[in-house]
Image (cartoon, rainbow, N blue to C red):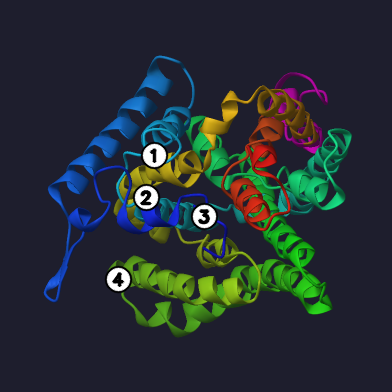
Amino acid sequence: DDTGHVTDIPVEDAEHGMGSHGGGEDGEHHSEFGVHITFEDLYASIIFFTFIYVMGAFAQRVLRMPSLVGEIFAGIILGPPVANWVPNPIAFVMLGEIGLILLVLEAGIDIDITMLKLIGTRGLIIAIVGSILPIGIGIAIAFALGVDTKGSIAAGCCFGPTSLGIAMNILRQGKIVNTPVGQLIVSAAVIDDMIALIILSLLSALTGPVEVVNLVMPVVSALLFLGLGGYIALTWFPKLFNRYVLSRVSDEKRAPVELMVMLGLLLGLMPATYYAKASFLMGAFISGLAFCRSNELHHIFVRQFKRILQWLMRIFFAASIGFQVPIRNFGNGTVIWQGLVFCIALLGKIFTGFLVPNFNQARRFTDIHLRDCLITGFSMAAEGEFAFVIAVFSVDSGIISVDLYA
């Protein structure tokens, strides 16, 4: 699609499902009375869900790693990259993206205003440096490996985004999302997503004639939504909403009303940010941010969405990320050693962690402060959804080769 997702799946497989479970006429049971599925597709989907859960549990309990590692490998093994077993892979990717939207929405709700004031400017600095530094290192590496100018720029840009999905998952398991360093990472990751969308829009200019409007629009749009939109969500909107809506609602109905209004904002801001050439995830984040002061909404959101969000995020890691890994190309020795060299670009993300302010009484860069620096650096080094979006767009546009994508 136009965001770059799953465009590496063959068209015939994307339309009819994967492997022997949805392909051809046997996999289609459509009639004038509705859309139906085959038992084989249903059974294969249940196996995929089970495999995701088992692999996640194995990674967490046996390997002592985050469960998302096993979930990503589940998508690689049963998805298009290896077994080609999963039916209708685009449907799974869509479910995963819905999970990511809910996760970003929750990230906005979880923002602590006091902590945001404490780390807001530093979060912006960390996001910008955490994008520019690894991009610069990546471009230099690509040039050193003999890639042309356009390909080098595209390859370097793949190392700019931070995966909010991966970072939030690990921060949750470490129970530090609501700490100052956790809020710092979330803020920086959201800004990184905006920078990634700007980068993607600028990369599109490399595929054809350069037009000023295509270069300027994403930057202006991102800054307006991030600055003005965030300011309105934190200041004007809560006052107006409390005065004209909540004041007329009984206490027991406040949380459901807030939830409905927040979902309405989500439905409005997502297309607004998307068609304005910004990130639709920013629309989700601002929708949640507008209600970050409401404890009642936070509680009802957790009650209503916690379990479904857990499963949607499992699908996100397995499908939205796992399906994108071109593991068949990893048998090429050149791909392996050059891929390891490109990992050096992630040092730019890790070094960014040392910009974290000292929130504790310990001396700088020792004890707890050193831990916060490393947590931030390695969280920022998480590469996921937008890195794949940029890479897939680049290879589909002919800016980079298939081997360089791998």
Residue stretch rendered in magenta on the structure: 349-374
N-term mark: 3 or 2: 3
Query: In front: 330, or 253?
Result: 330
Residue 152 occupies quadrant: top right
Picture disc at residue 89: 2
State the residue at coordinates (37%, 52%).
Answer: 13
Spatial CA span between label 4 and label 2? 40 Å
Q: Residue at x 68, y 53 (%)?
A: 394
Label 1 residue SS: loop
Number of other residues with Cα within 10 Å of mark 4, as a class: few under 14, some 14 to 19, many 20 or more:
few
Q: Is residue 31 left or right of residue 365?
A: left
Horizontally, is 356 left or right of 329 in the view? right
Q: Nearer the viewer, mark 4 or mark 3?
A: 3
Tag 3: amino acid:
Thr
Mark 1 or 2 closer to N-term? Answer: 1
Describe residue 45's horizontal placement relative to residue 371 as left or right: left
Nearer to me, 125 or 337: 337
Q: CA distance from mark 4 to mark 3?
A: 44 Å
* Comes first in the chain, label 4 or label 3: 3
> Residue 7 — which label?
3
The residue pinned by badge 1 equals 79
Q: How many marks?
A: 4
Lower position in the chain sequence, tag 1 or tag 4: 1
